[in-house]
Image: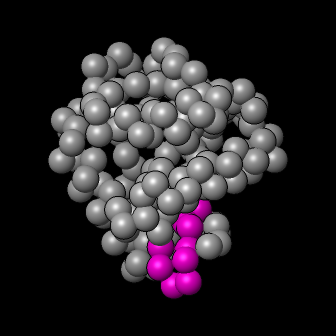
Amino acid sequence: MEIVVDDLSGPQIAEFLREHLAEMRSLTPPESTHALDLDGLRGPDVTFWSVMDGDAVVGCGAIKRLDAEHAELKSMRTAATRKRSGIASKLLEHILVEAKRMGFTRLSLETGSADFFLPARKLYERFGFDYCEPFGDYGPDPNSVFMTRSL
Protein backbone atom coordinates (compact mmCIF):
# COMPACT_ATOMS: atom_id res chain seq x y z
CA MET A 1 0.00 0.00 0.00
CA GLU A 2 1.25 3.47 -0.91
CA ILE A 3 -0.06 6.95 -0.04
CA VAL A 4 0.54 9.43 -2.87
CA VAL A 5 -0.28 13.07 -3.57
CA ASP A 6 -2.86 12.89 -6.34
CA ASP A 7 -3.51 15.56 -8.99
CA LEU A 8 -7.01 14.11 -9.47
CA SER A 9 -6.59 13.68 -13.21
CA GLY A 10 -7.14 9.92 -13.40
CA PRO A 11 -10.46 8.23 -14.15
CA GLN A 12 -10.10 5.81 -11.24
CA ILE A 13 -9.95 8.52 -8.55
CA ALA A 14 -12.74 10.43 -10.31
CA GLU A 15 -14.99 7.37 -10.05
CA PHE A 16 -13.94 6.75 -6.42
CA LEU A 17 -14.92 10.33 -5.54
CA ARG A 18 -18.15 10.14 -7.56
CA GLU A 19 -19.15 7.16 -5.39
CA HIS A 20 -18.15 9.11 -2.27
CA LEU A 21 -20.33 12.09 -3.21
CA ALA A 22 -23.27 9.86 -4.15
CA GLU A 23 -23.06 8.06 -0.81
CA MET A 24 -22.80 11.31 1.18
CA ARG A 25 -25.78 12.78 -0.70
CA SER A 26 -27.83 9.64 -0.03
CA LEU A 27 -27.17 9.90 3.73
CA THR A 28 -27.36 13.63 4.37
CA PRO A 29 -29.75 16.41 3.31
CA PRO A 30 -28.31 18.67 0.57
CA GLU A 31 -27.89 21.65 2.91
CA SER A 32 -25.81 19.46 5.26
CA THR A 33 -23.63 17.72 2.64
CA HIS A 34 -20.23 19.42 2.75
CA ALA A 35 -18.17 16.99 0.67
CA LEU A 36 -16.13 18.70 -2.04
CA ASP A 37 -16.57 17.65 -5.64
CA LEU A 38 -13.66 17.03 -7.99
CA ASP A 39 -13.31 20.70 -8.93
CA GLY A 40 -13.41 21.75 -5.28
CA LEU A 41 -10.69 19.24 -4.43
CA ARG A 42 -8.52 20.59 -7.26
CA GLY A 43 -8.40 24.03 -5.64
CA PRO A 44 -5.03 25.61 -4.86
CA ASP A 45 -5.78 25.47 -1.12
CA VAL A 46 -6.26 21.66 -1.13
CA THR A 47 -3.73 18.84 -0.91
CA PHE A 48 -5.22 15.46 -1.83
CA TRP A 49 -3.84 11.98 -1.20
CA SER A 50 -4.88 8.65 -2.68
CA VAL A 51 -4.12 5.33 -1.03
CA MET A 52 -3.07 2.86 -3.70
CA ASP A 53 -2.87 -0.90 -3.47
CA GLY A 54 -1.16 -1.73 -6.73
CA ASP A 55 -3.30 -0.05 -9.37
CA ALA A 56 -6.42 0.14 -7.17
CA VAL A 57 -7.53 3.21 -5.23
CA VAL A 58 -8.47 1.92 -1.77
CA GLY A 59 -8.71 5.20 0.11
CA CYS A 60 -8.36 8.95 -0.04
CA GLY A 61 -8.19 12.07 2.09
CA ALA A 62 -7.35 15.75 1.81
CA ILE A 63 -6.65 18.89 3.75
CA LYS A 64 -7.96 22.30 2.85
CA ARG A 65 -6.10 25.37 4.07
CA LEU A 66 -8.35 27.66 6.13
CA ASP A 67 -5.60 30.10 7.14
CA ALA A 68 -1.84 30.00 7.78
CA GLU A 69 -2.22 27.81 10.88
CA HIS A 70 -5.56 26.00 10.49
CA ALA A 71 -6.57 23.35 7.95
CA GLU A 72 -9.65 21.21 7.49
CA LEU A 73 -9.62 17.46 6.93
CA LYS A 74 -11.75 16.60 3.87
CA SER A 75 -12.83 13.61 1.79
CA MET A 76 -11.68 10.79 4.06
CA ARG A 77 -12.91 7.58 2.46
CA THR A 78 -11.97 3.90 2.42
CA ALA A 79 -13.15 1.51 -0.29
CA ALA A 80 -16.18 -0.44 0.95
CA THR A 81 -14.36 -3.75 0.43
CA ARG A 82 -11.42 -2.55 2.55
CA LYS A 83 -13.16 -0.98 5.56
CA ARG A 84 -11.78 -1.96 8.97
CA SER A 85 -8.45 -2.97 7.43
CA GLY A 86 -6.35 -0.11 8.83
CA ILE A 87 -6.31 2.06 5.70
CA ALA A 88 -8.05 5.03 7.34
CA SER A 89 -5.70 4.93 10.35
CA LYS A 90 -2.59 4.84 8.16
CA LEU A 91 -3.92 7.65 5.99
CA LEU A 92 -4.95 9.84 8.92
CA GLU A 93 -1.56 9.34 10.56
CA HIS A 94 0.10 10.37 7.27
CA ILE A 95 -2.12 13.45 6.90
CA LEU A 96 -1.42 14.58 10.48
CA VAL A 97 2.34 14.37 9.87
CA GLU A 98 2.05 16.18 6.53
CA ALA A 99 -0.23 18.91 7.93
CA LYS A 100 2.28 19.61 10.69
CA ARG A 101 5.14 19.59 8.16
CA MET A 102 3.19 22.14 6.10
CA GLY A 103 3.15 24.46 9.12
CA PHE A 104 -0.41 23.97 10.34
CA THR A 105 -0.94 23.95 14.10
CA ARG A 106 -4.62 22.92 14.07
CA LEU A 107 -6.63 20.44 12.03
CA SER A 108 -10.44 20.44 12.17
CA LEU A 109 -13.16 18.45 10.48
CA GLU A 110 -16.89 18.18 9.89
CA THR A 111 -18.53 14.78 9.73
CA GLY A 112 -22.06 13.46 9.97
CA SER A 113 -23.98 12.99 13.20
CA ALA A 114 -25.88 9.90 11.96
CA ASP A 115 -24.99 6.38 13.13
CA PHE A 116 -23.40 5.67 9.72
CA PHE A 117 -20.60 8.10 10.66
CA LEU A 118 -19.94 6.59 14.12
CA PRO A 119 -16.88 4.58 12.98
CA ALA A 120 -15.38 7.77 11.54
CA ARG A 121 -16.01 9.70 14.75
CA LYS A 122 -14.41 6.88 16.78
CA LEU A 123 -11.37 6.97 14.49
CA TYR A 124 -10.98 10.72 14.95
CA GLU A 125 -11.36 10.36 18.73
CA ARG A 126 -8.58 7.73 18.76
CA PHE A 127 -6.34 10.22 16.95
CA GLY A 128 -6.91 12.95 19.54
CA PHE A 129 -9.68 14.98 17.93
CA ASP A 130 -12.06 16.65 20.38
CA TYR A 131 -15.61 17.79 19.68
CA CYS A 132 -15.88 21.53 19.07
CA GLU A 133 -18.16 24.28 17.86
CA PRO A 134 -18.56 24.93 14.12
CA PHE A 135 -15.48 26.51 12.55
CA GLY A 136 -14.75 28.40 9.34
CA ASP A 137 -17.92 28.99 7.32
CA TYR A 138 -19.92 26.26 9.09
CA GLY A 139 -22.91 27.02 11.27
CA PRO A 140 -24.80 24.85 13.75
CA ASP A 141 -26.37 21.84 12.01
CA PRO A 142 -28.05 18.84 13.64
CA ASN A 143 -26.66 16.65 10.83
CA SER A 144 -23.05 17.70 11.48
CA VAL A 145 -20.45 17.05 14.14
CA PHE A 146 -17.33 19.19 14.37
CA MET A 147 -13.99 18.07 15.76
CA THR A 148 -10.53 19.60 16.09
CA ARG A 149 -7.06 18.91 17.40
CA SER A 150 -3.75 20.68 17.81
CA LEU A 151 -0.78 19.45 15.82
Q: Is 28 a magenta residue?
A: no
Q: Is residue 41 visible?
A: no
> Residue at the bottom extreme?
55
Write down the region rendered in magenta.
43-57
Q: Is residue 19 above or below residue 26?
A: below
Q: Is 55 a magenta residue?
A: yes
Residue 15 screen position, x and y as percent: 34, 72
**What secondary structure characterizes most of the magenta part?**
strand
Q: Is residue 85 above or below residue 135?
A: below
Q: Is residue 111 left or right of residue 108?
A: left
Q: Residue at x 51, y 84 (%)?
A: 55
Q: Is residue 87 visible?
A: yes
Q: Is residue 143 left or right of residue 81?
A: left
Residue 4 found in image quarter: bottom right
Residue 13 found in image quarter: bottom left
Q: Residue at x 56, y 30 (%)?
A: 125
* Count of numbered circles on the image: 0
Residue 5 screen position, x and y as percent: 64, 66
Q: Is residue 62 left or right of residue 20?
A: right
Q: Residue at x 46, y 19 (%)?
A: 134
Q: Residue at x 35, y 16 (%)?
A: 140
Q: Is residue 5 above or below residue 120?
A: below
> Residue at the front extreme?
85
Residue 12 screen position, x and y as percent: 41, 78
Colour scheme? one colour
* Nearest the eye: 48 or 50: 50
Residue 127 screen position, x and y as percent: 63, 35
Image quarter where the C terminus lies is top right
* Nearest the eye: 91 or 37: 91
Image quarter where the N terminus lies is bottom right
